[in-house]
Image (tube, helix red, strand yellow):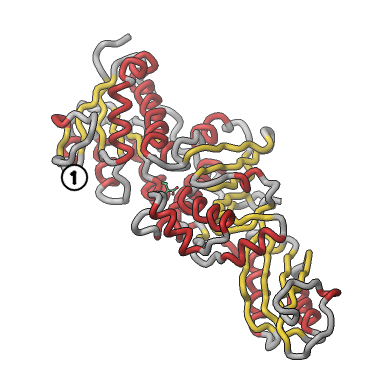
Amino acid sequence: MRTRPLKVALLGCGVVGSEVARIMTTQADDLAARIGAPVELAGIAVRRPGRVRAGVPADLLTTDATALVKRGDLDVVVEVIGGIEPVRTLITTAFEHGASVVSANKALLAADGAALHAKAAEHGVDLYYEAAVAGAIPLLRPLRESLAGDRVNRVLGIVNGTTNFILDRMDGTGAGYSEALDEATALGYAEADPTADVEGFDAAAKAAILAGIAFHTRVTIDDVHREGLTEVTAADIASARKMGCTVKLLAICERTPDGRSVTARVHPAMIPLSHPLASVREAYNAVFVEAEAAGRLMFYGPGAGGAPTASAVLGDLVAACRNKLAGVTGAGESAYTQLPVSPMGDVVTRYHISLDVADKPGVLAQVATVFAEHDVSIDTVRQQSRIQGGDETAVEQAGPRREGGEASLVVVTHRAPDAALSATVGSLRKLDTVRGVASIMRVEGE
Ligand code: HSE
């Protein structure tokens, strides 16, 4: 084994960074044996050096991150600060000074991954970011390396733990969105400002990274159609249950059927209870990968948290250190297919639509006509009459009809382009007999 240590700098020492520092110290001998040389923590850039960090050597702390990455003797820089700037500049500077970079920064990679990969290649160093998507779950390396000989057609996953916790609580207890969010906040799953999670930005960044790697093309967060879960109601969850489904916030990346483009989207969707993703509880993550030769693969585990995220960071650190020692770099960006990203309107999916309608003759036919006019085929229709004290009553059992009453009509469509489904809903809203569109949700995973 080489005795001269490889030098590593850490940018950020919060929940993840302090775990990285701790494991680097406590597992130093094992890491050295696995890499073939000792690894030395050369410096840690923090904003507040006075803060006590158990197990983190105080003499390594500095507030000057720029000077740290410019040292010139670093082998690897580990970035766990997050956000776009100043991190982009720090990472670029690290490359320019010969260091490989391990990052957990999904926002930066989803916004500017191509430029960063190009910069790393220009300087003959590595850029790894396994921790950026689904925490501890080994996912990017399997997609990039283990499946490099296969053709991935679809990636479908739960990649945000906070929102999965909220939806799991809504499903399990009948709670509304706000109540479930309050519980997630109290338990530390949701941040004080939960916008990035509940509006789907976090999942959209992860979807962009997954789509780019899976389909060997470039996808940025701006290419990802995004809908959060703030509009999901307890009634939606109850409706899903009646269909034998549950609601999950899904990240879905697909090749289009003609193979000429890809799509990437994040939105709440109903999935059948029989689908493996339906059983992903609390704040866990899981990702389904469908590849031509491999078939269906599922990756499951903790998607957040200090130690789980540090596990992914350290895996990358070992890989980057091994490459440094061997004088090589690992696989860089693979974007040779140059497949364009199609808009959401081209995605073929199914809708579950719940309408409040006038309960009088001809309304069902009128509604069905609107679907037909947009070339959208109806799979099932269920009517819940409100003239019998609010109890659900099947159409044929509705009993004596009271003219002027109201009913809920639940329509589930066959697969159709999202643009056609959305236009159908637009036309339905214009019908006098449709008093309101109570909910619209896509149905996936069948
Ligand atoms: N906020 C993320 C989540 C974890 O709830 O899954 C970091 O990506």
Picture quarter containing residue 385?
bottom right
Viewer-nearest residue: 205 or 182: 182
Residue visible at 33% across and 20% down?
27
User: Horizontal and vertical percent for residue 339?
Assistant: 56, 49
**Residue 424 drawn above or below residue 339:** below
Q: Indicate the amino acid at tag 1.
A: Arg
Q: Is residue 346 visible?
A: no
Residue visible at 86% across and 74% down?
396
Residue visible at 54% across and 48% down?
158
Picture quarter containing residue 119?
top left
Q: Is residue 180 visible?
A: yes
Instruction: Name the residue carrying label 1.
Output: 47
- In this rendering, position of residue 301 left or right of residue 429: left
Picture quarter containing residue 359?
bottom right
Viewer-nearest residue: 148 or 51: 51
User: Horizontal and vertical percent for residue 90?
Assistant: 25, 42
User: Horizontal and vertical percent for residue 233?
Assistant: 56, 66
- In this rendering, position of residue 423 left or right of residue 196: right
Viewer-nearest residue: 50 or 148: 50
